[in-house]
Amino acid sequence: MIELSEARNYVLAGCRTNETIVVPLNDALGCITAEAIVAAEQVPPFANTAVDGYALIADDTANVPATLRVTGTVRAGMSGADSPVEPGCAVRIMTGAPVPPGATAIVMVEDTEGSPEGDVVVVTASAKPGQHIRPAGDDVNPGDPVITVGTELTPAHLGVLATIGVTHIAVVRRPIVGVISTGDELVDDGSPLAPGQIRDSNRLTLRKLLESHGFETVDLGLARDDEQVIEDAMRAGAESCDAIVTTGGVSMGDFDYVKVVLDRIGDMRWMQIAIKPAKPLAFGTLTRSNGTAVPLFGLPGNPVSSMVSYELFCRPGLRKMSGFSKDDLDVGIVQGVLTEPLKRRSDGKTHFARVVCGWDDSSSTYTVRSAGAQGSHHMAAMAAANALAELPDGETLAAGSTVRVRLLRP
Ligand code: AMP
Ligand code: MG
């Protein structure tokens, strides 16, 4: 058995960062930026009002109530130029509208009396100069750095880019991932199970996991134990995908053709890792016809193992391919406190227990309890879990122990 860290380093070394592409903002959410963006425009582009009310000269409201003549209206989208504010006068103004020439403050409707359509307004609270005015460039000015290289684009980032008139951005292309399930026992068409058969659940689970993490997937199908079928599926994947994920056929006792085929057409390392579940892992590359090396993750077939292996190896590797920095390959790692003992025996392995993790406001800690049965085939408990708790080698951890937790749904 090798250590988890050795397996991870091996996998990560085999995952290279993808090339840079320019995409419309609409396609950039979650991508890592490959260029810095410096603002070329001012935001807001003109001084405007933060409230609905009246634009006026602050000095005219030194003594309240102050009665002012209403000489015009400016709405958002209008130019304020046609409605200058003269002494003793006010201009009705709506949120976002340009502050008309001459005005030095805005008074909110709530601090006035009089009908909204009337010729006069009575101001009941004195205005300070500049009140409720958002000056031009209050948010962003030309030359301001807005986005740095290596930023994971959030909706707010896209919003600020749209605000300054940027429509496209250079990002690291995210990998397209092909998923294959292997095993003669699998059925994937809903037909009744013959003796010894089980239903293929891994392919759907892994594809949806990948998609929920922002990766496009390709369904490469179910490859039964036939050398040619497996080879065709693998080769098709290497042509059309940036990475391939397979499940099944990688454990010690396996006599599947997966090993035979991958050893023949790929450059694979077969690992036994000191973790439970997900001890077996195959990782290596297939070579596309144009010479590109395509990483292949051979995950174990047990459903829980395949998901744990995905979290520990695939997801970090694919994040590296997507341009995330080496310190940002794991997601949602927190410390939690056990509210009940988590059973285990010393066996030389780190265990990843399926747990329910919650936030306790009164103690400001994450609490952790078992999600149920801990076998690598116990998918019901996996589905009930929202996190994996890392239990170092040793005996049962007592209630109150602190553990490292990997949140599956942060
Ligand atoms: P293997 O890794 O091929 O030795 O499979 C280990 C266990 O996982 C066996 O019980 C398989 O039947 C089961 N298994 C393999 N592939 C899948 C799959 N795609 N969906 C559900 N169970 C699977
Ligand atoms: Mg098998």
Image (cartoon, grey):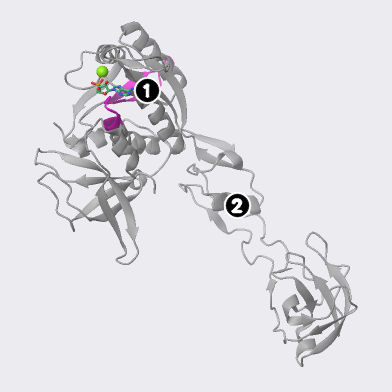
- Asked if residue 378 is among those painted magenta in the image, a careful observer would answer no
Q: Position of residue 203 (x, y in %)?
A: 38, 25
Q: Quadrant of residue 95?
A: bottom right
Residue 180 quadrant: top left
User: In this orientation, which residue lies closer to the viewer: 19 or 303?
Assistant: 303
Proximity of marks 1 and 2: CB atoms separated by less than 8 Å:
no
Q: CA distance from mark 1 to mark 2?
A: 37 Å
Q: Earlier in the sequence, mark 1 or mark 2?
A: 2
Residue 288 is a magenta residue: yes
User: In the image, residue 324 lies at what x, y percent?
Assistant: 40, 43
Visible residue check, residue 405: yes
Going 27% across and 49% down the picture, which residue do you hit? Answer: 405
Q: Residue 136 location in percent, x, y?
A: 69, 66
Q: Which amino acid type corresponds to the residue marked 2 in the rendered image?
A: Gly
Residue 295 picture quarter: top left
Query: Residue flagged by tag 1: what amino acid is it?
Result: Ala
Residue drawn at x 35%, y 11% is 231
Disc 1 under 8 Å from ligand 1? The reply is: no
Residue 244 in sight here: no
Residue occupied by mark 2: 159
Is 28 above or below relative to 278?
below
Q: Which residues are magenta?
A: 283-306
Residue wearing tag 1:
293
Left or right of 342: which side holds 137? right
The nearer-to-camera label among 1 and 2 is 2
- Determine the secondary structure under disc 2: helix
- Residue at image position (17%, 21%) is 252
